[in-house]
Amino acid sequence: MWLNMNNPRRQPGAGQHSDICGVDNEYSPAKAKIVKDKIIVWNDEVINPVAVRYAWENNPLRPNLYNKEGLPASPFRTSELY
């Protein structure tokens, strides 16, 4: 699954804080990488991903996704809450 973002940046050494889920709506920790202006998010065990969330904890430690101006990304999800 991929997300578009205007020039995303990641600080090295910090946690990723990405989760991904399939049609069962069970979120699992995800890996993420930045390729140009897209964030590629995956988990090898989630075959058909339908949603992603980032920094979706009460108090995420060291989130590390920033825009080109150096401002941190807000926590977000790509789906509605059920």
Image (tube, grey):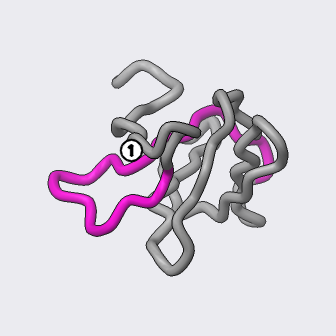
What percent of the width, then of the height, locates residue 79?
Answer: 49, 23
What percent of the width, then of the height, locates residue 78?
Answer: 52, 26
Count of marks placed on residues: 1
Q: Secondary structure at mark 1?
A: loop
Give the left or right position of residue 3, taking residue 54 as reference.
Answer: right
60 magenta-colored: yes
Give the left or right position of residue 30, taking residue 41 as reference.
Answer: left
18, 81: nearer the viewer: 18
8, 48: nearer the viewer: 8
Q: Determine the residue located farthest toward the top in the rendered image.
A: 80
Q: Determine the residue located farthest toward the left in the rendered image.
A: 58
At 70% from the left and 41% from the top, the residue drawn is 49
> Would you place residue 29 above or below residue 8 in this image?
below
Residue that label 1 marks: 72
Give the left or right position of residue 57, taking residue 22 as reference.
Answer: left
> Would you place residue 71 above or below residue 18 in this image?
above
Name the chief secondary structure element in magenta.
loop
Give the image quarter of residue 59.
bottom left
Q: Which residues are magenta?
A: 47-65
Give the left or right position of residue 58, taking residue 70 as reference.
Answer: left
What percent of the width, then of the height, locates residue 71?
Answer: 40, 41
Q: Determine the residue located farthest toward the bottom in the rendered image.
A: 13
